[in-house]
Amino acid sequence: MANMTKISERIECVKGKISSACARVGRDIDEIKLVIVTKSATIEAIQEVIRLGFFNLGENRVQQLKKVSTQVAEFLESGNDDSALPEKVNWHMIGHLQRNKVSQVLPIASLVHSVDTLRLAEEINASAAKLNLFPKILLQVNISNEPQKYGVPVGAATHLAEQIVTLPNLKLVGLMTMAPLMHNKDVIRACFVRARELFVELRGEKIVGPEFTELSMGMSSDYEVAVEEGATILRIGSAIFTS
């Protein structure tokens, strides 16, 4: 029970920091969606997060997504006499997605954050057509230009967005990026600023439609800066699940 209390306290701490960051730049906290990343969490901890009213959950790996989403579905089914529990949660696929795993992810994920090539987008589109689905996706951009990171280079992002919006079964609803893992907040902020600029450019040039509203950036180590620079989705795990 003590551990569950800690989860509640950590979530309140995260929410407080988000609220403070919003206040600093004049944003409304309701503009921001908190996706709780479950990769390091036990099923009991995930159940506690859901009981606390957080229904957007994220996973990095396909096998883990399948396993945990099944466990969560069983939990929600068994607890349907609890009026505080939702019928289902929204799963976010936030990690790198291989083309041969697409058909496993689409029935589960409400949003795929990590589309960074035309070939992957085409695979999602073809698989979605077979399943009669219209998945929402984000274009992952490698703003920091780190060779070990996935994501389309900034210079190629506009062209890729133009290609993706022609695919009939996909809904391109925003961008996703990751800042470098470092303590230098100026470098982190510069990455988030550039992502925001690209987001605004794509909207301004009418390359994307009105549904292009999401900017997924900010994790446990840098989410306050992300909020200050316009993030609409935060992906937070370790700040909630590890002491």
Image (spheres, rainbow, N blue to C red):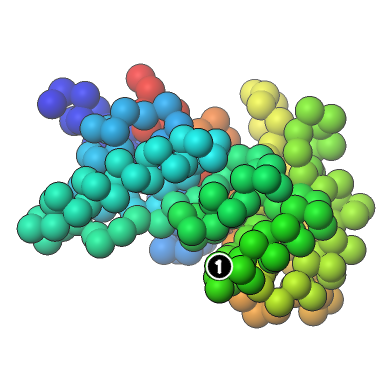
Query: Which secondary structure, mark 1?
Result: helix
x, y percent for residue 155: 91, 53
x, y percent for residue 148: 79, 28
Q: Which part of the image, by quadrant, shows the C terminus? A: top left
Residue at image coords 81%, 54%: 119
Residue found at the far top of this picture: 243
Find residue 17 and report its image quarter: top left
Question: Seen in the image, is 224 located left or right of residue 144?
Answer: left
* 11 in relation to 204, above or below: above
x, y percent for residue 125: 69, 66
Residue at image coords 70%, 65%: 126
Residue at image coords 40%, 53%: 56
Question: Seen in the image, is 230 located left or right of residue 29?
Answer: right
* 210 in relation to 182, above or below: below
Q: Residues within 10 Å of mark 1 (few under 14, many from 20)?
A: few
Residue 197 visible: no
Q: Which part of the image, by quadrant, shows the N terminus? A: top left
Q: Amino acid at mark 1?
A: Leu
Question: Seen in the image, is 45 located left or right of residue 90?
Answer: left
Residue found at the far left of this picture: 81
* 111 in relation to 183, above or below: below
Residue at image mark 1 = 131
Residue 136 visible: yes
Residue found at the far front of this picture: 130
* 187 in relation to 118, above or below: above
Q: How many marks?
A: 1
Which of these two is toward me, 153 or 101?
A: 101
Residue at image coords 71%, 52%: 115
